[in-house]
């Protein structure tokens, strides 16, 4: 049998050693009448070669973002992953180990997490970051629960320009804690959270306000001004970053008065992989560290005084505190964090700044090209690497026509925002060549113009 | 018994930030093929960042050496035997890793139109079916990211079921042997936890459940086999009783590796189960994830599963979002697809017979260790075990040796320690889960090491107190880490 080393003799030897005539004698605690009769209704065993053919075949029934030109983003970004990332995370000392409960033989994982925590702090300009959470959406839910613990208040205000799937996730997580969620409208002109709407929703019971930056429409939020309004009500401002490459260009949330910064670090080193595994991050101020969810690695010494690392502040966690823990999280996304660290280290400061400018420039180029064929931007505010356009018609047939030309032309927003009938969210990264963007604009023009002429 | 750990050249390695040298670069991003945009002219200056203080500036070879050296300070399943109880540290097949990296899987955007992702949807749909068959459940969602995420998912569905009927229930019964995630997830889902003790033989009794089960209880949440490695022999009677009182039975599937092809939890009255693909289905633990925690349910709870669901009509797969009773979603997109590919690959490679063989062998191996170490270490529950067995340090305490010392000494012998001090019901617990992928020779070496350590505990206990000695660092001062927290590097 695959992966099972026992020969028949080994199995017999073991049975004898344990004093059993058959495996069934060891299973006397199981109700015999309810045992599986015969075999499970599953396919039979495949050789590795057969299996590889089957998996190749299944994978070939998908179309990759390499085969088609893709302008999709919306919380999952197609970035170049340097070869060194996969090479190093494929070292099996990293990927076949467990959560580092035994620090003496886990220093590699522990130091790598400590470095990751530091990198997240540097990117966001926050004091402290955890070892990782599942993804950006669940990280927001954890941050909201954390804000409630810190403030002792219940009210949650989510910007309507926060990723719709993140908002759904927060609502799912908070059912048990009695919801108290309201949404602050976005400005249909600027495409950013409407300050008046936020002011209206804020009350003395508000625990936190959650704003994405750049937001779901791609627009940059004015976190600095929002922070003043939020803090006047003694609530916390939670900034959500779904595209951390933007932090190579934009002022970090920590410098803009944010109290908790969470988001999705998939952009660094983790493939699109049809939506997961990705990498939630959470960073905050030192004063809130005891209310953080998830694993934390700290620096200490071993008995000889040498620098060493270990998991710390475990008394916040489920295996110690059980129902009074700050979160139920146990397994997190360690290897994804390692990939992100290696990618960030590969870029370095200059590389990250250049990558951010490159992304920004690509998106600005595409914007101009689209404007040139008469496709207007939906919102006035500046953007990073994604933006929203507005067609005066249903985008569905347009996107379908683009698909025929092997172009995935962005995400129609009406699935999340029924009022945004003709809107498409478009993303351009370093993976989108000028040639590809030109072809996209030409194709779109060809699809739209005859319709206008008629 | 000779100590397995031997010499090996380990190199000191500073933090990546300490290797930094201004102006050095690793892998440069692509060149501009469009005009460089006038950032400062477009974005207001006060929204732009200045220096990223302390961000590393290192060359590619620095990075390669840095992480290679770090990896050498680690111990994984590929390094050696890793009998961490309740974690199912089985071999992680390499074909799984390769398959997850096929471009046709790894380069798919979650918002691609369904017609471009039929292969991915098919894989997911089939995996749901396999997990349903293995567990005896009616429907499966693959969305949760890990075991605890799956627990939350299952408990939220149970909560929604009762709210939907206008009779919300407030409590979850949890045995004292449960993983810490069980009460933590229950609390997060809005429930109060009612603890229940296992009886003398380490399993739950119907009487104990009868005492705490009432119509405020939404579910009994148990683990089967439980964390003592024992099959909950009264589960059917208990489930019937819980059902009679209108409650559900949730089974933490962390220990499913004992049951595949042998018995289906669904046949035993379990209504909800989470699968840990990173345990039972061979996907790697990654030094702390990513895992994947699909959830299986019986018909009654099916309407509450998270969205989206995968639908197959004729040979076409699609995602269904419109499900009014659904609890919603627990994360963005559809789950940890890359991990699903690995689990799918494992199930197809093993096949029906292979999975059964895996469970049987895991049980054999655990019983072998239990028998061979009987007498050397104290067995708090001397019953035939399933896939793991639990000892304690009772016999060693007299020499001033505790479980932690035994665990640390095992490292010098070249083994990863078992799970220690869990389950909480056993004082000084040593929980050993060998899995099916370990050979007789490996088990024998481990047994010999444990016996040698027991002997050392009597004759030269200081060896254990000083252990480990062959690792990069020796015993780590965890108290200091918490008292004087240093949670990040700062520029000196």
Image (spheres, rainbow, N blue to C red):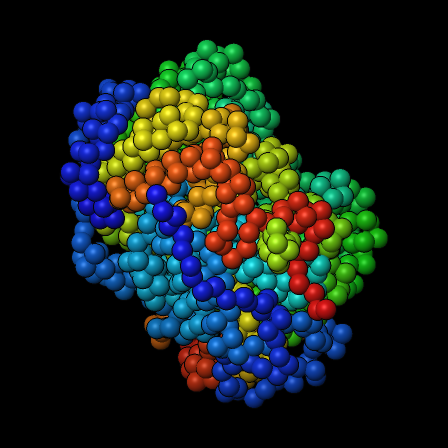
Q: At 46% from the left edge and 16% from the top edge, which residue is drawn?
A: B199
Q: Position of residue A382 (x, y in %)?
A: 66, 73
The quadrant of the image that shows the C terminus of chain B is bottom right
In screen coordinates, is B46 left or right of B227? Answer: right
Question: Could one spot residue B234 in this view of the protein?
Answer: yes
Q: Position of residue B224 (x, y in %)?
A: 39, 28
Q: Quadrant of residue B450?
A: top left
> In the displayed image of the protein, which residue is found farthest to the right?
A232
Q: At 56% from the left edge and 59% from the top edge, which residue is drawn?
A: A111
Closer to the camera in the image, A222 or A185: A222
Q: Position of residue B363 (x, y in %)?
A: 29, 33
The quadrant of the image that shows the N terminus of chain B is top left
> How many numbered marks does the figure carry?
0
> In the displayed image of the protein, which residue is found farthest to the front?
B459
In screen coordinates, is B408 left or right of A17? Answer: right
* Vertical comparison of A192 with B53: above or below: above
Question: Could one spot residue A297 in this view of the protein?
Answer: no
In screen coordinates, is A55 left or right of B55? Answer: left
* Vertical comparison of A428 with A319: above or below: below
Q: At 32% from the left edge and 31% from the top edge, which residue is drawn?
A: B372
Closer to the camera in the image, A294 or A391: A294
Q: Position of residue A213 (x, y in %)?
A: 65, 64
Q: At 29% from the left edge and 32% from the top edge, which residue is drawn?
A: B368
């Amino acid at each position: 049998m695959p992966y099972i080393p026992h020969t028949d003799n080994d199995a017999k030897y073991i049975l004898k050693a344990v004093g059993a005539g058959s495996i069934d004698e060891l299973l006397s605690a199981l109700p015999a009448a309810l045992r599986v009769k015969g075999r499970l209704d599953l396919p039979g065993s495949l050789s590795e070669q057969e299996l590889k053919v089957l998996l190749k075949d299944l994978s070939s029934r998908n179309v990759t973002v390499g085969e088609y030109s893709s302008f999709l983003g919306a919380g999952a970004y197609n970035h170049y992953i340097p070869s060194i990332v996969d090479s190093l995370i494929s070292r099996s000392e990293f990927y076949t180990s467990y959560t580092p409960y035994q620090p003496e033989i886990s220093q590699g994982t522990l130091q790598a997490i400590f470095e990751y925590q530091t990198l997240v702090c540097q990117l966001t300009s926050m004091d402290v970051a955890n070892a990782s959470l599942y993804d950006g959406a669940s990280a927001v839910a954890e941050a909201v629960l954390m804000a409630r613990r810190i403030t002792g208040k219940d009210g949650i205000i989510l910007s309507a320009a926060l990723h719709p799937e993140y908002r759904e996730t927060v609502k799912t997580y908070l059912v048990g804690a009695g919801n108290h969620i309201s949404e602050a409208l976005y400005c249909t002109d600027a495409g950013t959270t409407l300050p008046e709407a936020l002011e209206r929703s804020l009350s003395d019971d508000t625990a936190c306000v959650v704003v994405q930056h750049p937001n779901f429409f791609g627009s940059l939020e004015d976190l600095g001004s929002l922070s003043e309004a939020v803090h006047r009500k003694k609530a916390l401002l939670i900034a959500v970053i779904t595209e951390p490459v933007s932090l190579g260009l934009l002022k970090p949330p920590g410098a803009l008065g944010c109290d908790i910064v969470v988001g999705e670090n998939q952009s660094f080193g983790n493939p699109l992989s049809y939506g997961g595994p990705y990498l939630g991050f959470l960073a905050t101020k030192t004063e809130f560290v005891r209310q953080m969810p998830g694993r934390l690695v700290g620096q200490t010494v071993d008995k000889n005084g040498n620098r060493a690392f270990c998991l710390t502040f475990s008394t916040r966690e489920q295996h110690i505190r059980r129902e009074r823990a700050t979160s139920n999280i146990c397994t997190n996304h360690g290897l994804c964090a390692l990939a992100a660290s290696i990618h960030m280290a590969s870029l370095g400061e200059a590389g990250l700044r250049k990558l951010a400018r490159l992304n920004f420039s690509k998106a600005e180029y595409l914007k101009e090209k689209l404007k040139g064929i008469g496709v207007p931007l939906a919102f006035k505010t500046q953007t990073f690497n994604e933006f929203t356009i507005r067609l005066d018609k249903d985008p569905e047939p347009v996107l379908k026509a683009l698909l025929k030309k092997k172009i995935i032309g962005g995400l129609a927003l009406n699935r999340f925002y029924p009022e945004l009938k003709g809107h498409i969210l478009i993303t351009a990264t370093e993976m989108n060549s000028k040639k590809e963007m030109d072809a996209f604009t030409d194709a779109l023009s060809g699809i739209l113009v005859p319709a206008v002429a008629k | 018994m000779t100590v397995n750990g031997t010499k090996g050249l380990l190199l000191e390695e500073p933090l990546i930030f300490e290797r930094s040298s201004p102006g050095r670069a690793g892998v440069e991003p692509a060149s501009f093929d469009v005009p460089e945009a006038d950032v400062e002219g477009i974005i207001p200056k006060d929204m732009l960042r200045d220096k990223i203080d302390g961000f590393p500036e290192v060359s590619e070879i620095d990075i390669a050496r840095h992480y290679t050296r770090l990896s050498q300070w680690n111990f994984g399943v590929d390094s050696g035997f890793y009998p961490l109880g309740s974690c199912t540290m089985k071999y992680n097949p390499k074909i799984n890793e390769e398959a997850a990296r096929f471009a046709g899987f790894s380069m798919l955007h979650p918002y691609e139109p369904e017609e471009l992702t039929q292969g991915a949807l098919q894989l997911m749909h089939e995996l749901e079916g396999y997990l349903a068959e293995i567990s005896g459940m009616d429907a499966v969602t693959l969305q949760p990211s890990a075991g605890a995420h799956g627990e939350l998912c299952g408990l939220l569905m149970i909560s929604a079921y009762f709210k939907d009927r206008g009779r919300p229930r407030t409590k979850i019964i949890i045995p004292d042997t449960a993983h810490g995630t069980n009460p933590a997830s229950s609390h997060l889902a809005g429930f109060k936890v009612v603890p229940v003790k296992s009886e003398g033989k380490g399993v739950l009794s119907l009487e104990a459940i009868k005492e705490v089960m009432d119509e405020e209880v939404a579910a009994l949440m148990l683990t089967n086999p439980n964390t003592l490695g024992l099959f909950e022999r009264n589960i059917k009677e208990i489930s019937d009783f819980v059902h009679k009182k209108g409650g559900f039975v949730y089974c933490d599937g962390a220990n499913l590796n004992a049951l595949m092809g042998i018995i289906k939890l669904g046949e035993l009255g379990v209504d909800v189960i989470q699968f840990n693909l990173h345990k039972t289905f061979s996907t790697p633990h990654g030094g702390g994830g990513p895992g994947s925690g699909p959830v299986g349910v019986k018909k009654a709870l099916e309407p509450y599963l998270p969205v989206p669901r995968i639908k197959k009509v004729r040979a076409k797969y699609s995602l269904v979002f419109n499900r009014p009773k659904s609890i919603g979603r627990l994360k963005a997109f559809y789950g940890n697809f890359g991990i699903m590919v690995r689990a799918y690959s494992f199930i197809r490679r093993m096949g029906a017979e292979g999975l059964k063989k895996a469970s049987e062998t895991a049980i054999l191996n655990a019983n072998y260790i239990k028998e061979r170490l009987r007498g050397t270490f104290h067995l708090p529950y001397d019953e035939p075990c399933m896939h793991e067995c639990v000892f304690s340090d009772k016999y060693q305490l007299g020499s001033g040796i505790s479980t932690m010392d035994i665990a640390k000494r095992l490292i010098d012998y070249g083994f990863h320690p078992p799970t220690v001090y869990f389950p909480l019901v056993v004082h000084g617990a040593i929980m050993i889960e060998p899995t099916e992928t370990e050979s007789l020779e490996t088990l024998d070496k481990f047994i010999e090491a444990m016996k040698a350590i027991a002997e050392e505990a009597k004759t030269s206990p200081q060896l254990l107190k000083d252990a480990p000695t062959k690792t990069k660092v020796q015993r780590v001062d965890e108290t200091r880490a918490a008292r004087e927290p240093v949670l990040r590097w700062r520029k000196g």
